[in-house]
Amino acid sequence: MKIISDKFPTNIPQILAPFVSAIFLSYYLTGLIFEMKFGRPSSTSAIGFVFIPIYAIFLLLIGYVAGLLIRLIVSRLTIERTISKKIMYSIYALFLVIVLISSIAGGVSFKRYEDAQKPHVIINSAAVTKLSDVQYQNSNQVQNFY
């Protein structure tokens, strides 16, 4: 069973579209799932499970259109030829590796965000303790001095 056509350059849209969409989908869904399991999710974060796949479909369409444009340019420069099974298996393996890397990047991004958002001052029953090893983020609020 062929998932992707083995005719180059006619298969460019079929290769490019899933790559673009899967990278987006795996990155953001991994971050969202990690936020739900390990973080402090907002009240609207569950909506991401609806909108992230919708955005991924839009990106799939955009990737397909971009692939059509690339195929138009490449087909003028090269002749149509058949890609070997070894190269097709390499493309499938590359796809899986890219999705895995994207998922790991989503998890690392979540971890960095959670580390930056952890409390900097802890108030307990005895004293206020300032954590010394915390990297502070710059505030985007403007200070008004009257």
Image (cartoon, rainbow, N blue to C red):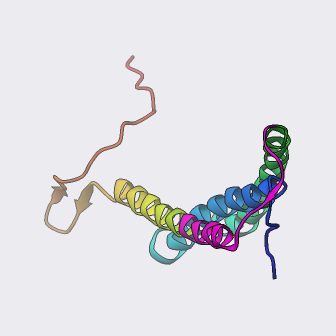
Q: Quadrant where the N terminus lies? A: bottom right
Residue at (79% x, 74% y) in the render? 3
Name which quarter of the figure residue 17 lies in. bottom right
**Whether residue 78 can be seen here:** yes
Left or right of residue 143: residue 33: right
Residues in magenta, as a range: 77-98
Q: Main secondary structure of the magenta part?
A: helix
Is residue 75 left or right of 108 when viewed as pictured?
right
Q: Is residue 126 magenta?
A: no
The relative height of residue 6 versus residue 135 in the rendered view (above or below) is below
From the viewer's side, name the closer residue of 117 and 145: 117
Of 54 and 93, nearer the camera is: 93
Residue at x-position 13% and y-position 66%: 126
The image quadrant where one finds the C terminus is top left
Q: Is residue 145 left or right of residue 110?
A: left
Q: Residue furthest top?
A: 146
Q: Position of residue 28 (x, y in %)?
A: 60, 62
Pick the front one: 6 or 99:
6
Q: Residue at x 79, y 49 (%)?
A: 67
Q: Any magenta on residue 83?
A: yes
Rendered location of residue 46, percent (x, y): 66, 69
